[in-house]
Amino acid sequence: MALPLADVGNKFEDLSGVDIKPGDNPYDALISACYGSPAKIQLLYATHRTIRNAQQREKFLSPDFNELNIDPILLRLERPDVEPGFQDPRHCLVFWARPPNHVVKLACHLQTLLQKAAPNLWLMPPHRMHLTTLEIAHSQTAQGIADLVSSMRPAIPALTGLTFTRRSRLVKPVISYDLSAVAVSFLPASGEEEVSPAAVPSGQDNSTGTEGDHYTYHHLRRDVFNMASESVPIGSRYVVPSAHITLGRYLTQEDHETPEQRERWIQTIEEVNKWLEDEVWEVKDGQFIGEWVVGQERGLEARCGTLWYGGGRTILAGEGF
């Protein structure tokens, strides 16, 4: 890549305190450290995002603040006059979980609130919103990804259909952010009241879906990793205890040039997070719902191509419920 990537400036480290040994399934380490307890798994996810947000807050408000990490590739795609004819050369292979309609509605509302403080924020289109359950490979050639897809093809139907019977819930959304992007992040559920709307009429779903929260989203990620690694090597950029949907990225310094602008940005995020906790978490029949069962409406989606910003093409999408 001739262009530096915006995410290069971010250090994607696991801030939960769990030590991952090279060569092992990286998701097993956290599950083992928590003895499989949903409450402990949720706590470590919460610890990670709380510490990371605190770190980013300090960076934004520091007197030594330099600038945001502008994504040069997204900039060229969104503003063709910068480099006419530019095309993203990075091909990837991933398994995505698509948010159900009520989560997309919430995410779009969050984008509206954030854009009040940062009018020039690039927003992820609603139809492209996704949660990366597992990244198989990134930044490769089209042929390199095609070869991986060919190797994985026999395993893809089972992988994309995994959420039909292995169901995990995500709850307690908050805004997470850094110098490159902003996202809404969720925690694996641990006994919270179920508030999601039913995806099918009562009595019409004859699956053997997992009951309760003992099977968490982190267990799902572990299982997807195990199944995928039987076919191809896994080349994820990072493995952290995070379940997030990207809401937007920065394309200009214009909204964050002054200390006052940056303070307003942080204040907006903190106000939104307070609203989420007070008005959305565990609220049933509210205007916005902050819980979802992974696989609701659509199963996992095997996707490849230039999908860094929600693009690419679908190889196969699993059955939803």
Image: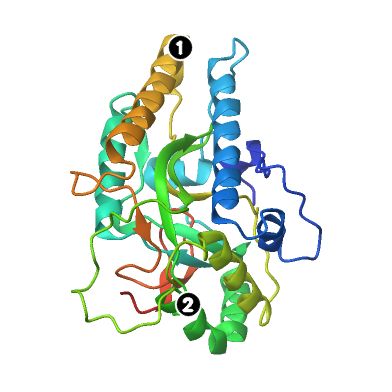
Q: In which quarter of the image is residue 311?
A: bottom left
Circle 1 residue: 258
Q: Where is residue 110 in the image (x, y as percent from the top left)?
A: 30, 38
Q: Where is residue 252 in the image (x, y as percent from the top left)?
A: 43, 29
Local packing at callout 1 (Cα closer than 10 Å; few below 14, some 14-19, many 20+) is few
Question: Is 49 on the left-hand or right-hand side of 268?
Answer: right
Of residues 175 and 303, the one nearer the viewer is 175
Residue 16 can be seen, yes or no: yes
Q: In which quarter of the image is residue 155?
A: bottom right
Quick one: SS at disc 2? helix
Q: Nearer the viewer, mark 1 or mark 2?
A: 2
Quick one: SS at disc 1? loop
Q: Quadrant of residue 79?
A: top left
Question: Is 80 on the left-hand or right-hand side of 49?
Answer: left
Q: What residue type is labelled 2?
A: Leu
Circle 2 residue: 162
Question: Is 121 on the left-hand or right-hand side of 108?
Answer: right
Tell me which label, 1 or 2, sits earlier in the chain. Answer: 2
Estimate the spatial distance between the alpha carbons at disc 1 and disc 2, rounded to whole Å.
48 Å
Residue contact at pointers 1 and 2, CB within 8 angstroms: no
Q: Where is residue 246 in the image (x, y as percent from the top left)?
A: 43, 47
Which residue sits furthest right?
Answer: 22
